[in-house]
Image (cartoon, rainbow, N blue to C red):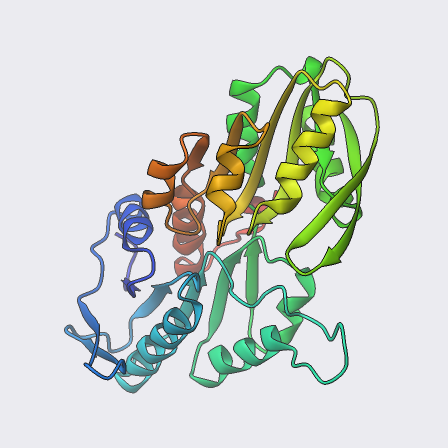
């Protein structure tokens, strides 16, 4: 176990926290996180943390607001218990899509959440695949934004033949991500041209690139209602793609997402466990869930040892 390190978690993703603790050869910190009958959250630390290098692992996934408050209260309890350094480990950063004003008189919610995390006494943030890289600048403390790319690439290389594979960006905004995957896999790429008419609804218009008789893999950072990727899969099939798969880091899968994926042309949906997926994995047999515990564990270990983590930014 690394010197002076303690790892705590809330209720959001205890299984991932347990995997990270195993990687670190450490025990999860003893804390009570529960709610009163009126819904108020109660946190109590059941062990001494004075001077410790503490990491709090908590994705701010559904229910987003409850998990954000748990994170804030755990950090506040640690600060008041005289912890040394406090690092918030947030595999999935909720509100990341609200990173700018897209219309008048709306908040920049990602900035507000960043302010809350900083104000409560956090010394450092460790996260994975932020939806928008500029969110790092919303914090006035160090932020390490890891990428799940190595985890996904390892699986893709073992499962798919790059000579017959086309990496597909589901929209113009994801071209840079798709290009990076295509370059590392040494394969071609294509782009879906789509127009979004309403929030959480999209219309696939055209496929730019040759996908006929090829295996295609749609790349995205997150999948929420699954409208984009399922319609993209239909467009790829109509253009003659032999096989359609998809991959993302954050499987939000809200609303009708599971039903859409089950009924879609997608043969395999490759995701990571930044968000707990136990029940959804049972409902959707197309899901292949990869663990990011070793990636997070190694980053935590290096931060604790004050060594470089730059090699993890692949």
Q: Is residue 186 above or below residue 169?
A: above
Q: Is 239 displayed left or right of 144 in the figure?
A: right
- Please name whichever residue, 231 or 162, is drawn nearer the observer in this view of the structure: 231
Q: Is residue 221 above or below residue 109?
A: above
The picture places residue 255, in percent across and down from the top left corner, at: 48, 53
Snapshot quadrant of residue 148: top right
Q: Is 230 displayed left or right of 3 in the figure?
A: right
- How many numbered discs, if any? 0
Q: In this view of the protein, can residue 186 be seen by the observer?
A: no
Q: Residue at x 38, y 63 (%)?
A: 58
Q: Is 118 displayed left or right of 25 in the figure?
A: right
The picture places residue 181, in percent across and down from the top left corner, at: 68, 34
Q: Residue furthest left?
A: 46
Q: Residue at x 48, y 33 (%)?
A: 262
Query: Where is the C terminus found, in terms of image quarters?
Result: top right
Snapshot quadrant of residue 294: top left
The picture places residue 289, in percent across and down from the top left corner, at: 42, 36
Q: Residue at x 64, y 29 (%)?
A: 217
The picture places residue 205, in percent across and down from the top left corner, at: 81, 40
Q: Residue at x 35, y 77 (%)?
A: 75
- Please name whichever residue, 220 or 44, is drawn nearer the observer in this view of the structure: 220
Q: Is residue 10 above or below residue 118?
A: above
Snapshot quadrant of residue 197: bottom right
């Amino acid at each position: 176990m690394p010197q002076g390190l303690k790892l705590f978690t809330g209720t959001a993703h205890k299984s991932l926290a347990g995997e990270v603790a195993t990687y670190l050869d450490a025990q999860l910190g003893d804390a009570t996180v529960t709610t009163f009958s009126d819904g108020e959250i109660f946190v109590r630390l059941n062990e001494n943390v004075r001077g410790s290098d503490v990491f709090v692992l908590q994705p701010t996934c559904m229910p987003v607001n409850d998990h954000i408050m748990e994170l804030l209260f755990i950090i506040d309890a640690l600060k008041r218990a005289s912890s040394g350094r406090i690092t918030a480990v947030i595999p999935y950063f909720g509100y990341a899509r609200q990173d700018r004003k897209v219309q008048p008189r709306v908040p920049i919610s990602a900035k507000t959440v960043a302010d809350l995390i900083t104000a409560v006494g956090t010394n450092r943030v460790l996260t994975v695949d932020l939806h928008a890289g500029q969110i790092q600048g919303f914090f006035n403390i160090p932020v390490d934004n890891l990428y799940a790319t190595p985890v996904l690439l390892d699986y893709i290389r073992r499962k798919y033949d790059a000579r017959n594979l086309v990496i597909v960006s589901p929209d113009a905004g994801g071209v840079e991500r798709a290009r990076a995957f295509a370059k590392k896999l040494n394969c071609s790429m294509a782009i879906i041209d789509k127009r979004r008419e309403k929030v959480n609804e999209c219309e696939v218009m055209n496929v730019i690139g040759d996908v006929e008789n090829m295996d295609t893999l749609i790349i995205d950072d997150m999948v929420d209602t699954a409208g984009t990727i399922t319609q993209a899969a239909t467009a790829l099939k109509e253009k003659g793609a032999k096989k359609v798969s998809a991959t993302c880091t954050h499987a939000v899968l809200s609303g009708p997402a599971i039903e859409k994926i089950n009924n879609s042309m997608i043969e395999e949906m490759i995701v990571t466990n930044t968000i707990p997926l136990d029940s959804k994995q049972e409902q959707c047999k197309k899901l292949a869930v990869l663990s990011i515990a070793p990636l997070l564990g190694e980053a935590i270990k290096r931060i604790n040892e004050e060594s470089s983590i730059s090699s993890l930014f692949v």
